[in-house]
Amino acid sequence: MAYSFLVTRSIPTVGLDRLRSGGSVKVNPYDRPMTADELVMAAADCDGILSMLTDRIDSAFLDRCPRVKAISNYAVGFNNIDVAECTRRGIGVSNTPDVLTNATAEIAMGLMLACARRLVEADGVVRTGQWRGWAPLDYLGVDMVGKVLGIVGAGRIGLRVAKMAAGFDMQVRYYSRSSHPEFDQIGAVRVDLERLLREADFVSLHAPLTDQTRHIIGAKQLAMMKPTAVFINTARGALVDEQALVEALRENRIFAAGLDVFEHEPVLSAGLASLKNAVLLPHIGSATTATRGEMAVMAAEDLLAMTSGKRPVHPVNPRRWG
Ligand code: NAP
Ligand code: GLV
Ligand code: GLV
């Protein structure tokens, strides 16, 4: 049987070709996310959706698209989807774990270096002709080698960052709901969040956005951090009270922050863009050609599996499949 699919944003051709082997494929024609109404209009006659993290898949959407039986999210995070509601309706949900772990960990490491050594600020000085030549007291940063790294959310990406940090002789602490033997094996020590924030020179977030993790870092937690600490978020913006972060950075209560994700992206909290001690990236964690290609194939294959009633390789709601 030939199925009908909606891909809500143009993705690498390799994924579209895979999907076309199982049915007809509509792709969002715009170079922007679809509005809620556009999404419903495009999805209403489809069996499966290949969705983006910018699409809200909730009961209002599902009510208006009763034919949809499968949602394959082109991301590992799935906080944009009401998974409980999908499960209740028998709709399968999948995501794209593992293939983007290295790429996202690289961005976390890159942000650490950029913040610690003020790379973006210093680049601006050189390219705007303001550089007066080498000077002993200019652009002083903080060291990374040998420092304490605190990982919040001990999952796939957090582990990869911890392993990369071993090359910098960093001492790793982690905070997670459960203990993780793969962290213990590399000498990382499990601590509570307060101890992590008080001891870490670098704090890097890698937990999913859930009701429990929303604003896990607010004014109180930022106040626990060292004035020399570097704060990195490549997970989800809403893990952080962004306005509180802006205030901490403005008053130099922490050294710097490197952010790939924002609380209300693509809109930034007031004052964030003018801070010299913030490095701001447009949510590019998984943005390499190879990674986005692998995500496309993975998402397409799982969508084909789910629409034909099979369990996907990367289920988000495994209970749906018994
Ligand atoms: P993962 O393997 O599921 O790891 C997340 C970890 O967070 C889990 O191991 C979990 O460990 C921990 N966690 C869950 N709830 C927690 C809580 N309440 N408090 C503390 N820790 C908690 O996911 P991943 O593949 O590493 O991806 C992590 C996140 O990164 C994704 O959810 C996504 O939002 C984000 N991401 C962003 C980009 C980007 O482009 N910037 C790219 C990829 C992923 P416990 O069960 O022990 O708590
Ligand atoms: C990107 O943010 C992802 O969750 O894959
Ligand atoms: C700096 O360039 C040095 O040689 O120390």
Image (cartoon, rainbow, N blue to C red):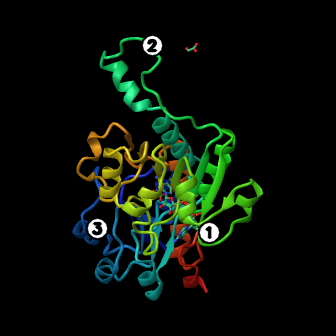
Residue type for callout 3? Leu
Find the distance from the CA under tag 3 to the CA under tag 1.
26 Å
Find the distance from the CA under tag 2 to the CA under tag 3.
54 Å
Ligand 3 found in image quarter: top right
Disc 1 packing (10 Å; few <14; some 14–19; many ≥20): some
* Residue 197 visible, this orientation: yes
Residue hosting label 1: 313
Residue at x-position 40% and y-position 26%: 122
SS for callout 2: loop
Residue 10 appears at what percent x and percent y? 38, 52
* Residue 300 visible, this orientation: no
Give the label on residue 173, or none. none
Q: Who is closer to the viewer here, 154 or 307?
A: 154
Residue type for callout 2? Trp
Front label number (2 vs 3): 2
Q: Is residue 23 left or right of residue 41?
A: right
Residue hosting label 3: 39
In this rendering, is residue 99 above or below 277? below
Q: Is mark 2 within 8 Å of ligand 3?
A: yes
Disc 2 packing (10 Å; few <14; some 14–19; many ≥20): few
Give the label on residue 134, or none. 2
The answer to whether the residues at label 3 and label 1 have Cβ atoms under 8 Å apart is no
- Label 3 vs 1, first from the N-terminus: 3
The answer to whether the residues at label 1 and label 2 have Cβ atoms under 8 Å apart is no
Residue at x-position 65% and y-position 40%: 146
SS for callout 3: helix
Residue at x-position 39% and y-position 66%: 215
